[in-house]
Amino acid sequence: MYDYYKLKRSARYVLQYLVVPVLLEIIIESLSRRSLVSGVGYMFSSPVLFSFNTLIIMLTLSVALFFKREIFVFISIATVWLCFGIANFVILHFRVTPFSAVDFTMIKTAISVSGHYLTVLNISMMVVAVCVLAFAMISLYKRAPRHHKRNHKRMVFSASAVAVISLALVFLKSSSGSVKALATNYTNISEAYENYGFVYCFTNSIIDVGISKPDDYSEQSVNDIINKIDDSSKNQSKSKNSDDKPNIIMIQLESFFDVDYMKGLKFSEDPLPVFHELTKNYSSGLLTVPTVGAGTVNTEFEVLTGMRQRDFGACEYPYKTVLRNMTSESICNDLSKIGYTSHCVHNNSATFYGRNDVFKNLGFDTFTSMEYMNGLQENPNGWVNDDVIAPQIIKTLDSTDGADFTFGITVQSHGKYDVDTGDYEQKIKVLGAPEGMENQYNYYVNEIALVDKMLGNLIKRLENRNEKTVLVLYGDHLPSLDIKADELKNSDLYQTQYVIWDNFGLKKSDKDMAAYQLYSYVLNKIGIHEGLITKYHQQTDWDSDYYLSGLKTLEYDWFYGDKYAYGGMNEFEKTDLQMGTYPVVLENVKRNSKGYIVKGKGFTDYTYIYFGGSKLEGYKIDSSHYQITDNIEYDEDEGYMSLQMAKENNVADEDIPNAFMAKVIDADNVELSSSKPLLWNFTSLYLE
């Protein structure tokens, strides 16, 4: 009888810790590949990698051996892996890049865009699923068997099992070329997940964060790079004062690419006449970007800093890691040295990807998000139309007497594209779209046609200005239209296009490049050579053997090293970022028939008026007038406190008694900025 129970227990362990991991791996790979046949086929086509993925699952499940509630812990871990597989399956329906650990840092961003991708029914089903899962896990916790004691023999067995699995993983990783290859073949994240398996790649995304230390990193290796730059600098003219420099505008066009690169597509009319005319007459080329279908800010990071996202961890978003707390060299910080003012204009929320914090570390002076714009209109997918971008960019140029750098970020052509357009006019018809994708292609092409029209309007405005200007346009990544590489004339999912327009006769020179090379290339064309990273790109042969390794050394030196290249100093300071090209201002408050009318500047639908720290009911009339419908009572007990007195006594602006303030608050109730206080005694109310 004893042998029977011993055999039965052994069979359970075999089933639990050997068979279940294999089944989980098959299910997860089937979900990732959207095919059960492909999932099972992966086991036979890549047996070593399949085994490596299975061993990772097995290792995590074996943690349950150390718990008294072994069954509960085992099922909980298995459920987590299954949920990861399902999450990856769902995510791949909306974007090209798979689910990775970095997505946990993007939850807030994901929630903010979920309304553009999920229906009410989708969200309801997800809530129900979470509730059912929670109920099931609680029930399991109460009912699952529990070991009352863990003897020494059992603990040794548990530790031995974990050790054996760990050794098997180490052996496979060190002896198998296919397993080791992952570290050097992460250029295409989607292909990496397909080749090396979801579990392996997802686990790698947890561990692989930041820039790995170069083998030869030292003060001497950094100085060698600096010396090469210094020697080359002798042949470069010095950057002139900003009075001699043009305004520089760069616009990152959401999911924008030249659809003529799609094989077999035909259009009832040219959807991009402006862009095509520009590429014929001005410098242009293909732009290699670090992402496809999503991940806008990784292209943005490369363009603004001149650094390679690939040098960071797999799937990492530097906006969510190093740039949350550290400043960095950037085009903004470099241009500030010669008197430029840097602006950003973006017709989406300021907190999207944490830009309202990151831009301080990148050296921007102002940031105008949708919360600081009027006249916003949405497309059928709920994204703000890009026609507001052109006037906002012109406003930034008008806001200073010197030269400006303005970075525009559009959003209109953002996915998803399978939307009910209703009566929405789509005048361009697309022929030859993949079967089942006709509606998506029609919608996308008509959206980028409107973006193209906006660009034409902007260029007309710039031509009418009496200021030298350079305008750089580029797509951040291909749209999430399930495009295959063999459907593109350039056969590369990681290439969009760029063009450089100007109004002072720059020579046309077409050249393909990477996103991290773009801004230094543009600055070189107009004679600006400020900044270490800028000079490195301008003076180093891009095809040389040491170009990329040298760049990585400089990146590591700044973010993780000893800053040898900068004399051991933190050269860049966080800017006092002003929200809005112009700040919101309160000028006066007086009574009217509906309550009180506030006069000021910069009011939008996201502006709210406060008095004595309390929010008042009301609404915006126009950008200069706000109607308060609440009753306002002057606090005699608190009386008058001057702004100088408040400052001397460390009283916060919102705590100053009997003072009005305007606050800009986004849809998630995040306060983005506030006006200077307007004291009661300085309004028309005081004279009544």
Image (cartoon, rainbow, N blue to C red):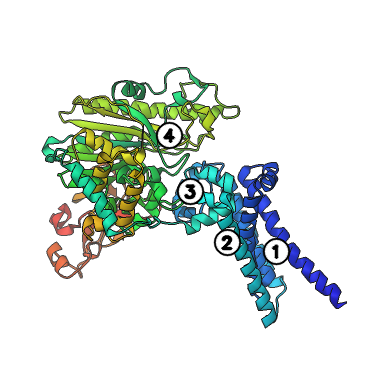
Q: Regarding mark 3 in the picture, which secondary structure is present there?
A: helix
Q: CA distance from mark 3 to mark 4?
A: 20 Å
Disc nearer the start of the sequence (1/2): 1
Disc nearer the start of the sequence (2/3): 2
Residue bearing the label numbered 3: 184
Q: Where on the picture, by quarter, is residue 516? A: top left
Disc nearer the start of the sequence (3/4): 3
Disc nearer the start of the sequence (1/3): 1
Quadrant showing the C terminus: bottom left
Disc nearer the start of the sequence (2/4): 2
Q: Name the foreground residue: 487 vs 52.
A: 52
Count all numbered tags in the image, as a single digit.
4
Identify the residue at image location x=22%, y=56%.
Answer: 566
Identify the residue at image location x=23%, y=65%.
Answer: 652
Is 583 positioned to the left or the right of 379 in the image?
left
Residue bearing the label numbered 1: 17
Name the spot of residue 136 as percent of width and height, x first. 67, 63
Q: Regarding mark 1 in the picture, which secondary structure is present there?
A: helix
Residue bearing the label numbered 2: 170
Q: CA distance from mark 4 to mark 1?
A: 44 Å
Query: Do the CB atoms of the residues marked 2 and 4 lie less than 8 Å apart?
Result: no
Q: Name the foreground residue: 441 vs 199.
A: 199
Amino acid carrying label 4: it is Gln
Amino acid carrying label 2: it is Val
The 10 Å Cα crowd at callout 4, few under 14, some 14 to 19, many 20 or more, is: many
Residue bearing the label numbered 4: 495
Amino acid carrying label 3: it is Thr
The 10 Å Cα crowd at callout 2, few under 14, some 14 to 19, many 20 or more, is: few
Name the spot of residue 208 as percent of width and height, x first. 46, 56
